[in-house]
Image (tube, grey):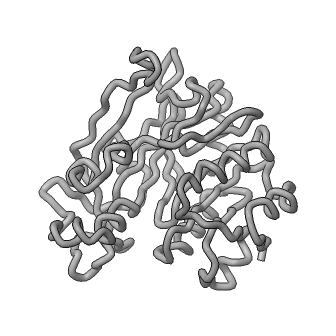
Amino acid sequence: MAGQYAGLAEFLGRARGALGPRPVALIFVEDEIEVESTVDHLDALGFGTLVLFTPEGLDLSPGAAERVHRVTYDTLAEGALPRAVTAVIAKAPGVWLHYCYNAEYLFFPFCENRSIGEMLAFHAEERREAMLTYVVDLYAADLEQCPNGVSRDGAMLDRTGYFARPRTDPATGRLLERQLDFFGGLRWRFEEHIPEDRRRIDRIGLFRARPGLRLLDGHLLNEPEMNTYACPWHNTLTAAICSFRAAKALRTNPGSRLEIARFRWPMSDAFRWESQQLMDLGLMEPGQWF
């Protein structure tokens, strides 16, 4: 096992050597669904360290356990994710961080044959220290066969129905430069079952840690420029987090579970687990990286 820690404080005190220089992925485990496939996926992308924040009692195979730093943590507590990510930021200046939940899978342009380190090196050369990631909802085609809404072999995604709205400064009401709120997927089609503050599908899911940086509620950072979708001069790289999280939530909540008979609709496509499909659908931007 790479490491096991009784809590966040113990991890931050003992595992400083694990936080860099290669990119670090922080995985927040909310249930037992597709934990190991999430670990496998991020490991294959080339992250230097995988940190698993998990409640007690989760069983991992020896192969998965030896690749992760496992931190006992109440991931379901209010504000648990931004609190832990912000604490890691303070201990990892200059390190690129990615955070996600279990059953979420990061994709970036050409990730099948290029590593996360290569991509972030190019992004940094363009003077970018954060990357917009769209959270693309995945879901099972047949909810009778897959009652939890999850099927990696039969995963579907929406090929249309994505849109953006201008983002305003809550303090002044003014439009924020190069910032938009993005919507779509299951959270758009079934928005009556989703709290308003959880309907957005944009997340700053990749960023370089720096002193004073904090992750806020809503998956944004306290530095406005790091929340932008592109630099001032041209389109820049974006990535996607393909996620079963909304499907799981809609199938867990008693109200939505009883009212939703199917996720599949005429605008569903089979997910091919490749970056080209996401780029073709406009869910990921290669920018100047070819």
Horizontal arrangement in the rendering, residue 83 relative to residue 136 (left or right):
right
* Rendered location of residue 155, percent (x, y): 32, 67
What residue is drawn where x is 68% and y is 38%?
A: 208
The residue drawn where x is 21% and y is 57% is 268
Q: Looking at the image, which residue sits at the far left?
A: 266
Is 248 positioned to the left or the right of 101 in the image? Answer: left
Q: Quadrant of residue 173?
A: top left
Image point (82%, 64%), residue name: 10
Residue at 17%, 66% in the rendered image: 260
Position of 283 with respect to 97 (left or right) is left
Residue sitting nearer the eye, 153 or 101:
101
Q: Is residue 194 above or below residue 29?
A: above
Quarter where residue 222 is shown:
top right
User: Residue 188 location, x and y as percent?
Assistant: 25, 47
**Residue 290 appears in the rendering:** no
Residue 128 in which image quadrant:
top right
Residue 7 spot, x, y in % from top left:
74, 66
Q: Quadrant of the N terminus?
A: bottom right
Q: Is residue 66 above or below residue 273?
A: below
Say if 168 sits above or below 282 in the image.
above
Left or right? Give the position of 8 relative to 116: right
Residue closest to the eye, 244 or 214: 214
Res. 218 visible in picture: yes
> Which x, y percent locates residue 21?
80, 47
Tally the numbered discs.
Answer: 0
Which residue is more in the foreground, 74 or 207? Answer: 74
